[in-house]
Image (cartoon, rainbow, N blue to C red):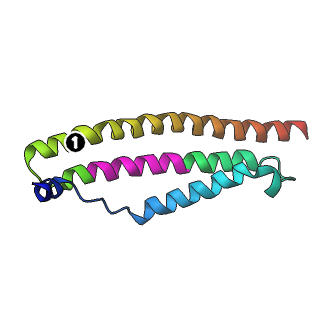
Amino acid sequence: MDNYLMLLLPGWPRVPPRLWLTAGLGALAGMNLLFIREIWPHTPSAGLVFRLFTLAAMLAGFCQLVLLLQAWTKAYAGPWWAKLLFRTVVFPGVAGCVLVAAITLVMLLSAVAEVFDAGSARTMAS
């Protein structure tokens, strides 16, 4: 009985290299934001740029995660009731990723607008 239940479990998905790259760039930008005063003390606009990079990496990562979860549920070859249960469990994760991606997109657009506002304020001042 235990072996049969283990066979019903889906295998872990293969994480694409693009998702690893996105996670690495997001972590690098996030670390730069965390240590902004130590690494970039004389560059005031570095915070905006790294916030943009972090938000863009988050948006790209969540979109890739949604595609990965959908492909994972479609590739599952088990009984119909186990597939239905698996999709029922994965669906809230996909919905959460879409919601977070939408919020991240709004934050990304506001950060881009802030960068352009800061650039136009500098040209007006000079």
Badge 1: residue crowd in 10 Å (few <14, some 14–19, many ≥20): some
- Viewer-side residue, 93 vs 58: 93
Residue 12 visible in image: yes
Q: Which residues are magenta?
A: 57-71
The residue sitting at 20% across, 51% down in the picture is 74
Q: Is residue 31 above or below residue 92?
A: below
Quadrant of the frame with the N terminus:
bottom left
The residue sitting at 28% across, 38% down in the picture is 91
- Viewer-side residue, 8 vs 32: 8
- Residue 7 lies left or right of residue 73; in this view the side is left
| Residue 14 position by quadrant | bottom left
| Residue 84 position by quadrant | top left
Question: Taken as a whole, is the magenta stretch helix, strand or loop?
Answer: helix
For label 1, the residue is 87
Q: Residue 79 appears at what percent x and percent y? A: 8, 49
- Residue 120 lies left or right of residue 18; in this view the side is right
- Magenta stretch encompasses residue 62: yes
| Residue 31 position by quadrant | bottom right
Q: Residue 96 appears at what percent x and percent y? A: 40, 36
The residue sitting at 70% across, 49% down in the picture is 33
- Viewer-side residue, 47 vs 76: 76
Q: Is residue 13 above or below residue 110?
A: below
- Residue 70 lies left or right of residue 15; in this view the side is left
Q: Residue 39 appears at what percent x and percent y? A: 79, 57
Q: Is residue 14 above or below residue 90?
A: below
Direction front: furthest residue: 1
Which element carries disc 1, helix, strand or loop?
helix
Q: Residue 78 appears at what percent x and percent y? A: 11, 53
- Magenta stretch encompasses residue 60: yes
Q: Amino acid at mark 1?
A: Arg
